[in-house]
Image (cartoon, rainbow, N blue to C red):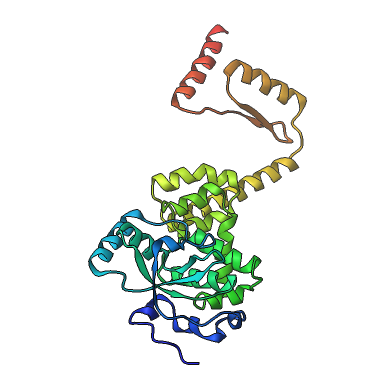
């Protein structure tokens, strides 16, 4: 069946293959594209399942001004609901800008679509226009996987030939704490910056996140930090294991350490070997703390 003429520029809105019956297994349940209509904005509503959740108001204002001068050059795509109105499938940004521009009607192509096909069209339009942030994309992938039972390979094919591993990596972003996901939505962090954080637990992420945002760490710097953190944790674990294997210190060492710690208000460790030799280690936290401890030791010596 031949496609109807859609006007110049429509192919840049939705790829031609989306208009083929073979696009997805539900396409045979969908009506073909209707003729182009002028529909009142008051009769159109956004799709609550639309993947995109954030719209840049400054960019909407720019588009609204362009629409005032040139009109809406590309039709939006809508589907009728059961209440006599229309739900947006593709083009919500143009719809919002047209509303800002004070238009009463907007050019629209009307289709009857399955829920899966609607989600796919919305997702693909936004991805191709690079309008979705990584969290919105991941949420849409999740819906395609869980609600419509698509495999990772099928999702990748639907959204422009992404590999199953690429789809899986994007889905993993949803494991991040809410504070990180919101930072991505707000544009404070990119997908590249937050992806390395997936390997951390929530407490570690919350601890380092303000520094990443305030100092504008690059993805590379974050990876370097995590590499150092991993080596430090491995070293600490090795030291703890070695410590666990050491025999318990003699009671007199423990008693002396506790007495010195009370006198000096500082951590004291006494170590000895089998020959009876050893070390007394006094830890200090700063130059001032060092001078304080030296003063106490000298005072003790003077009293003798």
Residue drawn at x 74%, y 36% is 274
Instruction: Residue 265 in the image: state x and y as whole percent.
Output: 58, 19
Furthest residue to the front? 84
Instruction: Residue 188 in the image: state x and y as whole percent.
Output: 41, 51
* Quarter of image, res 128: bottom left
Q: How many numbered markers are drawn?
A: 0
User: Which quadrant of the figure contains the C terminus?
Assistant: top right
Residue 194, compared with residue 208, is above or below; it is below
In the image, 47 versus 285, the foreground residue is 47
Tell me: 76 left or right of 58: right
Residue 112, compared with residue 40, is above or below; it is below
Furthest residue to the left? 69
Residue 263, compared with residue 250, is above or below; it is above
Residue drawn at x 72%, y 21% is 255
Instruction: Residue 34 in the image: state x and y as whole percent.
Output: 46, 80
Instruction: Residue 300 in the image: state x and y as whole percent.
Output: 56, 12
Residue drawn at x 46%, y 54% is 185
Residue drawn at x 67%, y 23% is 257
């Amino acid at each position: 069946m031949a496609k109807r003429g859609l006007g110049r520029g429509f192919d840049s809105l939705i790829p031609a293959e989306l208009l083929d019956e073979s696009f997805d297994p539900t396409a045979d349940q969908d009506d073909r594209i209707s003729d182009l209509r002028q529909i009142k904005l008051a009769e159109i509503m956004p799709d609550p399942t639309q993947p995109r959740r954030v719209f840049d108001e400054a960019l909407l204002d720019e588009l609204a001004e362009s629409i005032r001068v040139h009109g809406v050059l590309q039709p939006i795509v809508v589907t009728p609901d059961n209440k006599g109105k229309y739900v947006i499938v593709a083009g919500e940004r143009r719809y919002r800008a047209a509303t800002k521009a004070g238009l009463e009607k907007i050019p629209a192509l009307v289709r009857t679509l399955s829920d899966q096909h609607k989600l796919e069209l919305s997702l693909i339009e936004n991805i191709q226009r690079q309008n979705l942030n990584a969290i919105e994309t991941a949420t849409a992938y999740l819906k395609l996987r869980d609600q419509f039972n698509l495999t990772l390979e099928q999702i990748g094919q639907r959204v422009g030939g992404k590999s199953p591993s690429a789809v899986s990596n994007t889905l993993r972003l949803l494991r991040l704490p809410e504070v990180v996901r919101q930072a991505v939505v707000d544009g404070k962090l990119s997908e590249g910056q937050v992806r390395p954080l997936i390997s951390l637990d929530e407490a570690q992420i919350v601890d380092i996140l303000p520094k990443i945002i305030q100092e504008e760490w690059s993805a590379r710097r974050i990876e370097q930090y995590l590499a150092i953190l991993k080596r430090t944790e491995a070293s600490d674990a090795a030291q703890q294991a070695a410590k666990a294997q050491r025999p318990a210190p003699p009671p007199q060492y423990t008693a002396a350490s506790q007495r010195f710690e009370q006198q000096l208000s500082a951590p004291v460790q006494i170590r000895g070997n089998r020959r009876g030799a050893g070390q007394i280690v006094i830890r200090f936290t700063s130059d001032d703390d060092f001078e304080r401890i030296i003063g106490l030791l000298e005072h003790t010596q003077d009293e003798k």
